[in-house]
Amino acid sequence: MSAAWEVVIGLEIHTQLATQSKIFSGASTAYGAAPNTQACLVDLGYPGVLPVLNEEVVRMACKFGLAVNATVAPRSVFARKNYFYPDLPKGYQISQYELPIVEHGELFITDEAGKEKRIGITRAHLEEDAGKSVHEGLDRHSGIDLNRAGTPLLEIVSEPDLRSAKEAVAYMRKIHTIVRYLGISDGNMQEGSFRCDANVSVRPRGQDTFGTRTEIKNLNSFRFVERAINFEIERQIDVLEDGGEVVQETRLYDSGRDETRSMRSKEEANDYRYFPDPDLLPVEISEEFIDGVRDTLPELPDDKRHRFIDDYGVKQDDAAILTASRALADYFEAAVAASEAKPQVVANWVIGDLSGALNKEGLEIEACRIPAEDLAGLIKRIQDNTISGKIAKEVFEAMWAGEGTADAVIEARGLKQITDSSAIEAIVDKVIADNPGQAEEYRAGKEKLIGFFVGQVMKETGGKANPGQVNAILRSKLK
Ligand code: ADP
Ligand code: MG
């Protein structure tokens, strides 16, 4: 990208709230049911039915507002956003417009220079999701599945404070982490529970006013967000450098071709003829309600990260990785508590071998096959010299494969480290006797051959000899 242009991005993130029932009806929100089995008369938009607000969504929105240091509005209003689409039987979506439930929040990301950067959150408002059109498996027809209609969403709108695709992803990840810490959304991106629209514009560096933006709809992975934005930045710069103008429009990202395509010209708010929904009362929230919600807030990711650095002495980058999910942070803390090792040693195992094993199988920490206490048990056996760090990797693999605790694996596979000096001495003698040429060279000054001899002893012992002892005994015998 040319240094002459500055990028401006604002995200609208839709996160599905993890309620049992829908925002205005009692129908279930469970994912994956047969089409139209979870849509009641309210979701189907039958005449004469009335929406009833699910109190839980108010509590969840309030939780989010407090977590991002925002104002929770004492009074907010549901509005009708009118448009026609087959998956919207009422002909309008119930959303919030002029008076949203959450306003003026903020969060902090680490920018590309490694500095903390504040990103403003303009607002977060409650709304209902629409249904889905289904094309697969239907010969030249489309079907409508209204199971998703009426599912509660929190739409979180950022200020245009983001300056690169990487920053946009960092911001989106942060929101993702926060909603999962709060337990207000499962954040499942494959199922569409967490998705975003990216607004992108460019302007000549130094210009005060923003350039014309486009909006890329419905991005449902972090990778796609980054790619779609980068494609769009290049496209806009090309248009402007060729003397053209960026058209304000809605675009779709095609991940197969890695490009964005025009979908429709940008609609204006007045196209939707918003007006307050006469079927719903304003949402009034008392101070007591907010205080009650505040009491239920968990420790938030940033606080946890700082605590890991300050109290455990864990490296900054590692603390960020460990606190990316609450479950991973809990796992780490449980392993630290159960082991006598330095927390950084535990962190290395969790971030290294354990995360590696999880990633290989596409598992989250919740599905981890080695309990935190057992990982601590393995680390203990390295610390007390029962096994070397190298053998520990083998023990870990066996534990992962279901062979039991570290002690059970060490016993069953006979991996206990050889620390008996006379046993090691005997093997060292044999190795030196078997390799007279190398021994002579070593004695003549080729000291790096020590590695060769250590290797030979390890080979003889199946890697079980204590490496420190092997080294010392070899050096004295080769003198
Ligand atoms: P709408 O509801 O029409 O999509 P909003 O004004 O509410 O528009 O803005 C939506 C998002 O677009 C916000 O995240 C905002 O920060 C972002 N945004 C607004 N103007 C620009 C711009 N010129 N370039 C990039 N992002 C922008
Ligand atoms: Mg928008």
Image (cartoon, grey):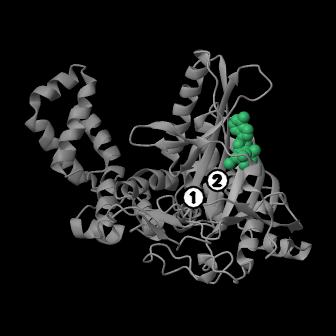
Q: Which residue is mark 1?
A: 194
Q: Nearer the viewer, residue 91 or 347?
A: 91
What amino acid is labelled 1 in the image? Phe
Query: Is residue 377 at all visible to an observer of this figure?
Result: yes
Across and down, in percent, residue 219 comes to 53, 49
Q: Give the residue displayed 47% in from the left and 63% down from the top.
A: 133
Please report contact status of discs 1 and 2: CB closer than 8 Å, yes or no.
Answer: yes
Q: Give the residue displayed 80% in from the left and 24% down from the top.
A: 208
Q: Give the residue displayed 25% in from the left and 19% down from the top.
A: 445
Cα distance between the residues tagged 1 and 2: 7 Å
Q: Give the residue displayed 71% in from the left and 77% down from the top.
A: 56
Q: Which residue is mark 2?
A: 13
Across and down, in percent, residue 379 comes to 43, 60
Across and down, in percent, residue 297 comes to 74, 68
Q: Which mark is residue 345?
A: none
**Quadrant where the image shows the N terminus:** top right
Circle nearer the N terminus (1, 2): 2
Q: Quadrant of residue 454?
A: top left
What amino acid is labelled 2 in the image? Ile
